[in-house]
Amino acid sequence: MSNKYISASEINQYLYCPYQWYYEKKYGHKYINELREKNGIRYEDSNFKKGIEYHEKYYRDIVKLKYKKIAIAILILLAFVAIVIGFLK
């Protein structure tokens, strides 16, 4: 952590996953991969891979939630329009 300045991309990385940012900042991506290989841990079994999968699932869940909110808003709007049309007749 010798560099006292943090770039905008590092802030983005930190907001995405503080743990990943910290370990890459402290040890470096190359060292983390070397350590994983030295200990005989396959990439598929590593915490890094599990973290990526976790974040991908989290992102998919957020996108699904966004579309559900949009669908609910549309249904409420359609119900409101149907009620207004019913009163106008």
Image: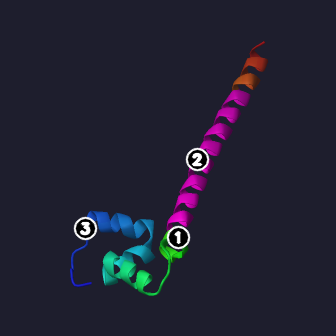
Q: CA distance from mark 2 to mark 1?
A: 30 Å
Residue depicted at x 21% and y 75% = 5
Mark 2 or mark 1: which comes first in sequence? Answer: 1
Residue depicted at x 25% and y 72% = 6
The residue where tag 3 is placed is 7
The residue where tag 2 is placed is 66
Q: For this view, does 46 lie left or right of residue 35?
A: right
- Residue 70 placement: quadrant: top right
Q: Residue 30 in the image: x percent, y percent?
A: 32, 77
What is the chief secondary structure element of the magenta stretch? Answer: helix
Residue depicted at x 53% and y 59% = 56
Q: Nearer the viewer, residue 29 or 74?
A: 29
Mark 3 or mark 1: which comes first in sequence? Answer: 3
Q: Residue 88 in the image: x percent, y percent?
A: 75, 15
Q: For this view, does 48 lie left or right of residue 72?
A: left
The residue where tag 1 is placed is 44
Residue that lies at the very extreme toward the bottom in this rendered image? 39
Q: Mark 1: which secondary structure?
A: helix
